[in-house]
Image (spheres, rainbow, N blue to C red):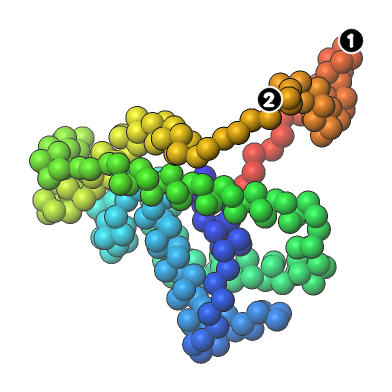
Amino acid sequence: MLQRILMLLILTLPLACKDGETIEDIGSYSITTKDFENHYSVLVEKVAQLRNGDKSTFARLMCHPERMPDDPYLREVVRNLEPKEFYERYREMRIIEQAARKENFQDDPIVKRMMEQAQLEVLTSLFVMKKLEKRIKISDEESAAKCVELRQKLPDQLGPLTLDECKKIAQGFIREERMRTEMPRVREEIKESVTISKNQKFDRDDFLANKLETYKVLKKTGGCDADSAGPALETPAKPK
């Protein structure tokens, strides 16, 4: 999920600054040192926000991989912070982007709507995370206590860390735990802050169940109204 959102950020929130020395030209797009620096800084900021952590924590884990907790997802996040790793992914996206623009793919109405939806997903995800960050307060005592607990569970990874380093890791674990309980409350508070006026003459349930054209086509294609279940179905492949 994190990787998907980060990719959407790069695609839907391009940075305009083109100063700096040219690294290479890809089609009509020039990747400059300043351009890449800007995109890399966005990556670092968003990794910290979406992971609900501290940039210094990721920096220490990047510099001392032997202290990494046994968390494959975290390892992937830190690996993606390597400039060479990110540059290859960013470069590939620009190459594919140029190929897409050459065919005016970005002007396709469906693609435009997908990009708008992607930007909506990014905006709302980051806004909720910002509100969560303000809500979650962790005391030094709580961090120290969690550090002791984690060192007992992960002595090889966390044992060599200093107390301050261990407490930073502990804060990340506490945040994740509290996020699970605070997330629903934060989302409800956000929704309550916005005025909603419903059209009392409109039957929303009837529209969603019976009059949404795309849904009606899906039901017809899938044989929802047929007497038999039809041929066996293949499970859709998971997105890569």
Which picture quadrant has residue 230?
Answer: top right
Identify the secondary structure beneath mark 1. loop
Which picture quadrant has residue 151?
Answer: top left
In this image, 97 relative to 190: left or right?
right
Q: Which mark sits nearer the N-terminus, 1 or 2? A: 2
Specify the label residue 15 is tagged with. Answer: none
Measuring 66% from the left and 53% from the top, which residue is drawn there?
A: 116
Give amino acid for label 2: Gln
x, y percentage for residue 137?
23, 43
Q: Which residue is mark 1?
A: 227
x, y percentage for residue 188?
44, 32
In this image, 206 relative to 95: left or right?
right
In this image, 240 relative to 153: left or right?
right
Give amino acid for label 1: Asp
Q: Which residue is mark 2?
A: 200
x, y percentage for residue 182?
35, 33
Q: Estimate the spatial distance between the alpha carbons at disc 1 and disc 2, rounded to whole Å.
A: 37 Å
Q: Is residue 112 visible?
A: yes
Q: Residues within 10 Å of mark 1 (few under 14, many from 20)?
A: few
Identify the secondary structure beneath mark 2. loop
In this image, 33 relative to 167: left or right?
right
Measuring 76% from the left and 66% from the top, which residue is drawn there?
A: 100
Most foreground residue, 72 or 93: 93
Q: Residue furthest top?
A: 227
Q: Residues within 10 Å of mark 2 (few under 14, many from 20)?
A: few
Q: Is residue 183 visible?
A: no
Q: Is residue 35 above or below residue 112?
A: below
Q: Nearer the viewer, mark 1 or mark 2?
A: 2
